[in-house]
Image (tube, rainbow, N blue to C red):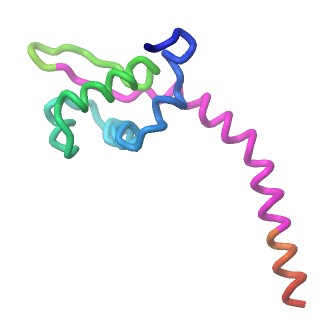
Amino acid sequence: MVTPSSKHDIFQAIADPTRRSLLKLLADKEMSIAAITECFPISRTAVNKHLQVLSEARLVSSQKIGRETRYRLHSEPLIELKEWLFFFEQYWDKKLSALKQFVEDDNE
């Protein structure tokens, strides 16, 4: 069961490698579910479930055109992810600086 707080969880949505691949695929163009399914070694039902998770996280939107449903990326929610990663960059920079200093000191 999806709780209201996790329904739009971007981190949960991108945790799965297939969903990350779907986002990359939709980054450049709008695609039908049939075209998307051709790009993955999983069933149309499985692709549809992944798209539903991405849709609930507001990372993709769908539009029905005739009998075809087309999906497109909405990158705005990824800003939350970018901001979260940006916060931790300071720690990575400190660790890399410490490693550089260690290596340089060891070579002297």
Main secondary structure type of the part rendered in magenta: helix
Magenta run includes residue 90: yes
Would residue 63 appear left or right of 94 to someone viewing this image? left
| Residue sitting at the far top | 4
Give x and y (percent) for residue 64: 19, 14
> Which residue is at the front of the view, 107 or 86?
107
Where residue 7 sits in the image (x, y, percent)? 49, 15
* Camera-nearest residue between 58 and 41: 41
| Image quarter (top left, top right, bottom left or bottom right) of the C terminus | bottom right
Asked if residue 16 is positioned above or below residue 57 in the image, the reply reads below
Nearest the camera: 43 or 21?
A: 43
* Residue at 74% in and 48% down: 89
What residue is drawn where x is 9% and y is 15%? 67
Magenta span of residues: 69-98
Q: Is residue 94 above or below residue 27?
A: below
> Which percent across, then down, holds residue 107?
85, 89
